[in-house]
Amino acid sequence: MLRTVPLAGELTASLISRVAARYGLTASSVMRLWACRNSSSRHDGGGVRADAEVVLNGAGWGVLAELCGVEPVVLVRALLSFTVDDPKISNSRDASLAQARWRVAAAVAGEAAFGCRLCTARRTGQAVRAVRYLPRRQRVCLRHGRWLLDADADQPLEHLDLRLLPEVVAAQRRWPGVARRAVRAGVEPAQAFTLAHAVVARWWEQALYWEQGEVWPRRLHHLAGGNAGSRLEWWRVVGREPAIFPEVTAVAQALLEPAMAEVAWRASGGMQPRARGADDAFCHRLGELVGRTWLGPEVAADHGSPLNDWRGAIVRARRHEMGPPGWREDPWRLKRGCPAQPSIRRLHRCWISDRPRDEPYGWWSESEHWTRLRRCLHDEALPLDVRVTGALMLLYGMPITRIAVLMRSDLTGGSTPHPRVGERPVPLPPAVCQLLQRQADRTEPISAVGRITPRPGWLLPGYAAGTHHSAPALARKMRLHCLPGRPSRSTAVLALAADLPASVLSDTLGISISAALQWTRRAGPRLEQLPSSSPYGGDRC
């Protein structure tokens, strides 16, 4: 019997996988020792989730202790799921049998992350994958300079290299001191981190519009191995946590300082409230503490930040103002609607799903929109028909059904193509013109046995002679390249509706005036222009 000791905070499913690896078996074959009452959670692509957790009953824990060759008390100290009781297996008629039930780690004991393989090999002698319960405030492996990634996403990376980012490692070393200060102030360290994370995560989303912000783009490119390139959007999701961790630590430390509460009180006008301006002393001081002296006006102009809730609670407490009945006036409590740690599942669900009923089905943010458009214009690895379709969708919101039936004769204007989007031809940027011209020149005659068919008139010819590309097949091809049609079109029409009146929008896109009015109302103040000098990249096209 081989002895396998669990790691501190390790998932039970991870321990079972390591035990199976020691015996040269698969995890599924070892799981037959327990009667499983359900199946493990899977990703949309069908793969088993790395953060899938197993909850056992009393008899099941006995089997696991015997399999690992350790005493049950060792499992109690190391495995957080040991104390979790599932009534469906512990109170059933077969409770005397070894039973197991699959759950998601976040629903059992909290966030799960991949363990450092080098540390796992040093501790156990096995250079295999391990998954542990680790909050985001403890994700840096100080020994090997790695950021341990979330285990809830279907992506191949387990860690990010921090050797070129010593400030992230230094922030992790400072965090225990911040946690002790929070305890002395009567605040849970997790609450302080969650609020600071929500504040900085909001800055991260706004940083695309900051022309002076150079620190985060530099970190992001370092995390990507030197240059994020065409996968900038993907890296902005994967690399966000390590990139903002030093600022999260600095903000948490600043908000725990009594002096900052005093600055917030004086900046608000004390007992005589005054409007907040761009020269707000509190926002300016917070910008200095995070190493960005220019950040004060940007923070002061953001009236929806969780920082305002913290500041308002501090000021109201000093003014002895009472909130509505039942209102819990806790400055460290994150209000509903301010998610502090959005899941990395945005990699596979880039459009927004929590929307009002009268809103479009889904859309992208400005950064996601322009990243996809740049990809269609400049990524030679994409098929040409995908680039053409994506460019027309992302610029003018043309539906795939209309793009599929475009003919070469629809490109009017001589050497400069002007496709008919609505009632009349519309001009296109030079980069898109070149794409359309390349696609039009590429429509070769289709050969058949014994004859040559004439040159097809379709811009996107199909596989059969004389036919255009099937719209459903083209839509599937776009989804395979992460360019789904519905959010692409919604984002493009929202962007146009923000700049054009309803009458012009209706004439340009060929939609009814009532639909154009709805799109104009939906656009509202949602879309803003990215600065051309954004540090995340150069010009959009």
Image (cartoon, helix red, strand yellow):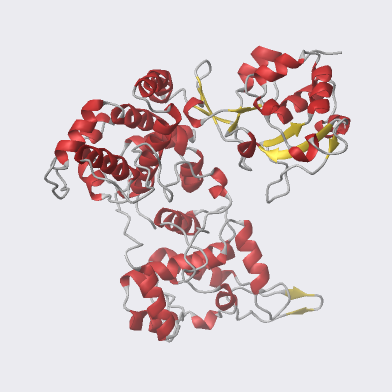
Number of marks: 0
Q: In this view, does 219 lie to the left or right of 125?
A: left
Q: Is residue 15 left or right of residue 212?
A: right
In the image, residue 61 lies at what x, y percent?
79, 24
Q: Nearer the viewer, residue 289 or 507?
A: 289
Q: Is residue 95 above or below residue 478?
A: above
Relative image position of residue 488 (x, y in whole percent): 50, 64
Residue 99 percent coordinates (x, y): 83, 34
Rendered residue at 79%/22% (across/down): 19
Question: Hey, which residue is sitting farthest front in the picture?
Answer: 325
Q: Residue at x 56, y 33 (%)?
A: 149
Q: Is residue 541 above or below residue 7?
A: below
Q: Quadrant of residue 317?
A: top left
470 is higher (above) or lower (below) than 541:
below
Q: Which residue occupies 77% across, 26% down? A: 16
Position of residue 214 measured from the top left corner of the image (x, y, whole percent) = 31, 38
- The residue lying toward the viewer, choosing from 416 and 330, is 330
Q: Which of 34/40 is in front?
A: 34
| 194 relative position to 455: left or right | left
User: The C terminus is located in which quarter?
Assistant: bottom left
Residue drawn at the location 48% of the way across and 37% of the way down:
239
Please state if 154 lies on the left or on the right of 520 as rendered.
right
Res. 249 image quadrant = top left
Q: In the figure, residue 171 lies in which quadrant?
A: top left
Q: Can residue 5 be seen in this view?
A: no
